Every structure is written in C-alpha cells, then in structure tokens.
Amino acid sequence: MNAATGRLAGKVAIITGASTGTGPVMAKRFVAEGARVVLAARREEMVQEVAREIGEGAISVRADVTSEDDVRAMVDRAMQEFGQVDILLNNAAAPGQDKFVWEQTLENWNATISIDLTAAMLCTREVLNRSMLERKSGSIINFSSTAGWRGDARKTHYVSAKAALRAFSKSVANEVGPYNIRCNCLVPGSIDTQLWQNYAIRRAAEEGVSVEAWRAKTFESLPLRRISSPDDISNLALFLASDESMTITGQSINCDAGAYMVG
C-alpha cells in the first residue's frame, strides 16, 4: 500500500489498548493505509515493541487511560509529534472478574467501569478539545461487545459498561455532528486472541469438557460457524475511520459472525 494514497493518507490516529489483541493489528493496518499512529497502553515495554515492529509512522506512549493526567499527556504527545488528531479508537478494555451479582465487589465493578467506559469519555473529551472541534473533522470509534446486547450472566460489571458505550456513542454523535465529527460504536463478538483462548480454556475446565469440544460447541451456535479474527475487526475499524463512512454516525455495528442480530 502506498501511504500517500492510502485510505487514511494524511490522518493521525490514537489507538488505546494498543499493546495486545486487536490493537497492534489495527495499528499496522492504519499505518499501511497512510495514517500516522500513536499507540497507547499501560504496559510500556509491550507497546514500545509494537511501535518498533511497525516502524515509521508509529510512536508509543505509556498511558493509563483511566487517569486524566495520562490522557492529557497522550494527546499532548500526538499534538507535539503530528499537530492534529483525526481518529480516536477507544479500544482499551478489561473484562474484570466474572461474578454473579450477589458476589459482585465494588472494586471489581468500579475498576471495570473505569477502563471500559469512563476512559472512553476522558479520551474523547481530550481529542475534541485539543484538535477535532477546532478543525471541524474527526472520527471517534468506541469498542463495545455483544455481551452488552445479550446481558451475559456473571458479567454485570462488563455488560453494563459495554452497553453504556453504545448510548455514549449516540449522545456524542449528536453533540459533535454539527462540527463534522462522527462517533460510532464497533461491537465485536468473540475475537480469536490470546484473551479469548484463555477464556475458552477456563470455560472448558468449568464445564468439564475439552477445549476443542467447547470451541466446537461455541462455533456451532454461530450462523457463520466461526468467530472474528483481529483482521476482521480491523477491516471494520478502518472503514469507520475513513471517509468511506462519511455519513455514518451514532451507529452500533456488530462484527460477530451473526452472534447477535439487531433489528
């Protein structure tokens, strides 16, 4: 891909949660399409390694996106290096600990809400104030989960945060639309990452079956008989970040192999 003619040529993106999972995959894809990317994550060495692997067009920042000071410093770095922010991917997330609501702890609840919901507000507020509102341009993408549609058991903390992200995205879209800024919510189902593989191992053990049998049962329940890859998520994120989706805003778009069909 010629960076000068890519779908994100001349754009600057911030991607949170960029050290593992879909974050590095999206970053590589965005740089290949011409974007310059700020990769942010709490694990400094890991996110630095991702930036080194990508090379030109990517820089790394250690940031805890639940901290106002860290979020300000993250956007400061983007502005110092690149002078603008065109795209924000609020990808940082944490599943918390699975607990029935009668077992739920305030610590588990607050920690999950903080990183899965409040962080998206902090990052959104900062990029709007520092670049997007003045330039009257931008695309903000929040990352929810089909768990937020289904209301999965033992996940009240996670489900509440991920469902709220859809409402947050609609409200932001209404507020920033007059400034030619878009905000959408990408809603993945299961993604074949190390995190999901670890989850599969744990669930298989809980049910007393092999991991292969648990995976097969999971796939059988999906219309497409598969789960998404990080590349699948990156394809949709790229579309929502690019001018190809110029009149799409306030939407929650599933990418889940048909796990949850809205409508």
Image (tube, helix red, strand yellow):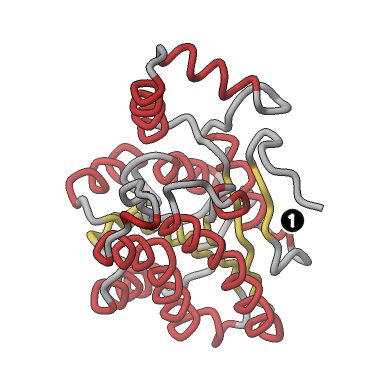
Mark 1 closeness class: few <14, some 14–19, many ≥20 residues within 10 Å: few
Q: Residue at x 34, y 43 (%)?
A: 55
Of 215 and 11, nearer the camera is 215
Q: Position of residue 248 (x, y in %)?
A: 75, 64
Of 118 and 245, nearer the camera is 118
Q: Position of residue 96 (x, y in %)?
A: 33, 51
On screen, residue 227 above or below 167: above
> Which residue is tagged 1?
244
Of 260 and 250, nearer the camera is 260
Circle 1 — which element?
A: helix
Q: Residue at x 56, y 42 (%)?
A: 234
Give, as a three-letter code, the residue at label 1: Glu
Of 114 and 233, nearer the camera is 114
Toward the left, the furthest residue is 45
| Total residue callouts | 1
Q: Position of residue 222 (x, y in %)?
A: 67, 28
Toward the right, the furthest residue is 263
On screen, residue 86 above or below 135: above
Q: Residue at x 49, y 12 (%)?
A: 213
Q: Position of residue 107 (x, y in %)?
A: 24, 64
Q: Quadrant of residue 196?
A: top left
Toward the front, the furthest residue is 102
Q: Say which quadrant the N terminus sits in.
A: top right
Q: Is residue 167 left or right of residue 124?
A: right
Q: Residue at x 43, y 61 (%)?
A: 14
